[in-house]
Amino acid sequence: MILLGIDVGSSSVKLSLLDADSGKNLASAQYPKQEMKIISYKPGWAEQNPEDWWQNIIYALRELSQIENVDLTLVQAIGITYQMHGLVCIDKNYTVIRPSIIWCDSRAVELGNTAFRDLGNELCLSKLLNSPGNFTASKLKWVKDNEPELYNKIYKIMLPGDYIAMRLTGDATTTVTGLSEGIMWNFPDNKIADFLLDYYGIKPEFIPEIVPVFGNQGELLKDVARELGLKPGIPVAYRAGDQPNNAFSLNVLQPGEIAATAGTSGVVYGVTESFAYDPKSRVNIFAHVNHTDSEARMGVLLCINGTGILNSWMHKNVAGSKISYSKINEQASRVPIGSEGLSIIPFGNGAERVIENRHTGCQISNLNFNIHNSSHTFRAAQEGIAFSFKYGIDIMAEHTGIHVEKIRAGHANMFLSPVFRDTLSGITQVAIDLYDTDGAEGAARGAGVGSNIYSNFEDAFSNLKKLSLVEPDKNYTDQYKEAYNKWYSVLDKMLN
């Protein structure tokens, strides 16, 4: 049995073919090879064309088909994971009306803040578990206010993964987890958050049919199967946002378990059975992939927008792209903990929820021309990202009761860097388990569960391979604390 996982990120689309019996990744492909274009007509805006996601899936499938011993017609089920919080609008012909306003776009911040004040903090937090913030519902309100001609053409709205499922099956559908990440789900009443849609003047019929996260969400159309080289009629059997799916890919499903990722953005994601929330909505609560009416499983998400994108910026603009990421990591490792006083606040990729949706921009502080060189900036960037994780983890513990005791992460992206791993482990005093998996593989496993190829979650993860363990070095605890305190003092001045 072969399962296909599709991971639609904002940097690229990645596909993985998983052998269901062995758990082995048979082949993977990624497109484009460089980062996908993000359209930014104004500061704080971020858009992508959904058609580009679709074309990148086609290109990646063609690449897979050219790999020796790969037969795409043997795929039995498809799973989808995708960049969260984006807005896709389609008309009655299922045609996209405008580019997708994606997760890191911050144009709707004030609309969400106003809704939070007008509706009341208690109502929003008790029903939505979050502020309306800069999420999908608020982005749709922005379209309504600023692009009324386009708004009047809308038939359905979707998350990015819903759009890909529609292209595969011809059905416009969504999930409760998707609605919760768009801040359109009323948890205590277990229904669409019509009070928020009413406040925004949004038609509830814009919401597509709701399907389960795991299960038959539609079958692959014949003409689409022919175009993709797949077998017609196979089910799309799983769909989840990238961060719940990242947790799922690491078998993080039960209360108290923690996952982390550090791609373009960085996330710490913990599972709880409680509806506890942060009063300032700096960490966010969504329905996890295994949440049900009878058994609550909530995902508490700490997101740092400026994570891998900061490291990428360093690679392009400081290293000049002439130095590989591994060389950057090597140079950073030569600099002492604390980067000899240099601090970088990594908030340069849109409004940051962890600082109450402020758009402060990245700041480099205490740069000394006589001491610091490029190696210091490499280390300070990675330390700044790890310290941002620590800042958010403290908020998570205080307000949602999730105390991080061990972190699970895929051996990918910034977790490939010893400096980043050691800094995160050192400042949190928490061990990190690194696994050989990623989002696309997680989506493939999800498809296996949703199509009943796996009988249960335990069966799906029986072959998940742990690669290594990173433990905090007690000899450097004080140095990490001192470095964090200096970094925090810079952040505190920025915010106050």
Image: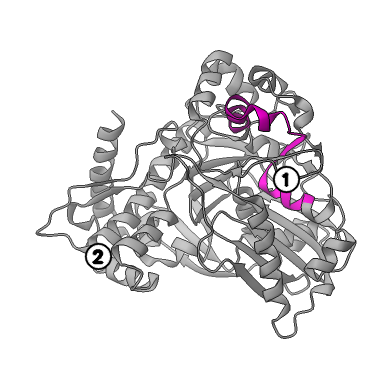
Question: Residue reaching furthest bottom?
Answer: 68
The image shows residue 357 at horizontal and vertical percentages of 45, 32
Q: Quadrant of the C terminus?
A: top left
Residue 249 picture location, percent across and down: 64, 58
Q: Quadrant of the N terminus?
A: bottom right
Q: Earlier in the sequence, mark 1 or mark 2?
A: 1
- Give the numbered dot on residue 369: none
Which residue is tagged 2? Answer: 375
User: Local crowd at mark 2 within 10 Å, few (<14), some, or many (≥20)?
Assistant: many
* 195 part of magenta stretch: no
- Is residue 154 one of those drawn in magenta? yes
Secondary structure, mark 2, is helix
Residue placed at 57% from the left, 61% from the top?
12
Q: Is residue 149 above or below residue 421?
A: above
Disc tally is 2
Residue under pointer 1: 290
Instruction: Name the colour scheme.
Output: one colour
Residue 311, placed above or below residue 464: above
Report whether 248 appears left or right of 490. Answer: right
Q: Which amino acid type is shown beneath numbered disc 1?
A: Asn
- In the picture as drawn, the residue positioned furthest to the left comes out as 370
For badge 2, the amino acid type reads Ser
Highlighted range, magenta: 137-166
Q: Nearer the viewer, residue 71 or 43?
A: 43
